[in-house]
Amino acid sequence: MPRAAFKVEAAKKSVGDLKEADLKGKTVFIRCDLNVPLDGAKITDDTRIRAAIPTLEYLVKNGAKVLVTSHLGRPKDGPEDKFRLTPVGDRLAELLDCSVTKIDDCVGDVVKDAIAGMENGSVCLLENVRFYKDEEKNGADFAKQLAEHADLYVNDAFGTAHRAHASTAGVTEFLSPSVAGFLLQKELDYLDGAVSNPERPFCAIVGGSKVSSKIGVIESLLEKTDKIILGGGMIFTFYKALGKSVGSSLVEDDKIDLAKELMAKAEKKGVKILLPTDVVVADAFAADAKTQTVSVDDIPEGWMGLDIGPDSVKSFQDELNECKSVIWNGPMGVFEMDAFAKGTFAIADTLANLDGITIIGGGDSVAAVEKAGLADKMSHISTGGGASLELLEGKVLPGVAALDEA
Ligand SMILES: Nc1ncnc2c1ncn2[C@@H]1O[C@H](COP(=O)(O)OP(=O)(O)O)[C@@H](O)[C@H]1O
Ligand SMILES: O=C(OP(=O)(O)O)[C@H](O)COP(=O)(O)O
């Protein structure tokens, strides 16, 4: 699991550039992405909270008064108890090993009063910023209210960096300096570094279910990679584009022409697009469905492909073992069901043992790697699904763009 051998130019000012003299006694407004999955009040995966700790510890250690802000879920119409950040505050306190005062609002007098009582090196967690509609509208007045009681801004919310919201972008108009946290920096170093300056051969693995949401990524990766492995539900759109029968597999008919274009473009560029040669098909989308493994030329009518087959796993492993860097976005099959998880887990295992850089680009691929127990064997696991996709597509992330230049 080597660390990245590449690093992008540090384009944005980092929290690490701020020392004790800049931070001691200062009120720091830090935007984190503490949007974790909850089962009632129980956090089922605290990865995002753990990922936020290094920057928070740095601020605490240097004597700042730390105001932590985040969203949780997508509340539609003001405060809702199930979207309160209270369980997050409790977990934060455990991980930071200090008390965290949870405030029941994120703007106004209650915040002002809380700050008045804060000691240097203490932490307050503000309430879900999305309880205010103006957060997502990036309303200037709301951004000003968020900034009102703080001295400077840190954005460490990589998972929300693709949103131009008041707490991720607008607030920078009112706070200076506005700097990147360590997590944001690390995500950019890996994900941007991976595609800008990879060690070669460089392979992208793209899977998952939706061609429509991944097409931009595949197109952008064609410009950077030496080979692209395709898996998951999206392959059937490509097979159909190649004139094959796909039974009742998932297909996005309106993307068949795009799939054709991508394959033609790849050929012109000399980038190998590798599609599975065999698939596990089922007679229903169910854990206990009847299954068989068939060549992609023989998918029976009425059966659907739900995983890549063993021959494909073998040839993908051979291709991957030649690579020095690999980025993976999207599972190879319906890994949530044991019968269709083998392909995804075999690829996860190959990456875990690869002598090269391995980057997992968020979303379900991360869930699959976690389920396989191999997360700590990868070079980098991104905390942002949508954000990592947009970054890989070459889009500008508003939460990053708004920060001060280094
Ligand atoms: N052959 C398939 N048919 C239908 N769904 C699939 C297939 N292969 C994978 N999937 C599903 O794709 C989903 C993940 O897709 P996606 O959201 O695009 O990935 P990610 O979140 O990693 O970006 C998983 O829930 C998985 O069950
Ligand atoms: O969970 C998130 O996105 P992700 O599932 O794409 O990683 C982020 O917290 C952003 O949330 P949003 O998609 O409601 O803006």
Image (tube, helix red, strand yellow):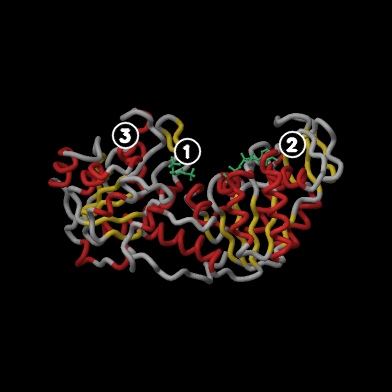
Amino acid type assigned to the residue bearing label 1 in the image: Thr
Q: Position of residue 336 (x, y in %)?
A: 64, 38
> Image point 38% across, 58% down: which residue?
401
Q: Which residue is mark 1?
A: 44
Mark pair 3, 1: CA separation: 22 Å
Residue at the extreme right:
298
> Does ligand 1 reach within 8 Å of label 2's beta carbon?
yes
Q: How many other residues sit within 10 Å of disc 2, few (<14), some (14-19) or many (≥20)?
A: many
Q: Position of residue 382 (x, y in %)?
A: 50, 53
Q: Mark 1 falls on what kind of element?
A: loop
Of 94 and 49, nearer the camera is: 49
Mark pair 2, 3: CA separation: 40 Å
> Image point 62% across, 42% down: which residue?
210
Q: Which residue is mark 2?
A: 249
Toward which corner of the image does residue 264 lie, by quadrant? bottom right
Residue 218 seen: yes
Q: Position of residue 334 (x, y in %)?
A: 67, 39
Q: Earlier in the sequence, mark 2 or mark 1?
A: 1
Q: Which residue is mark 3?
A: 131
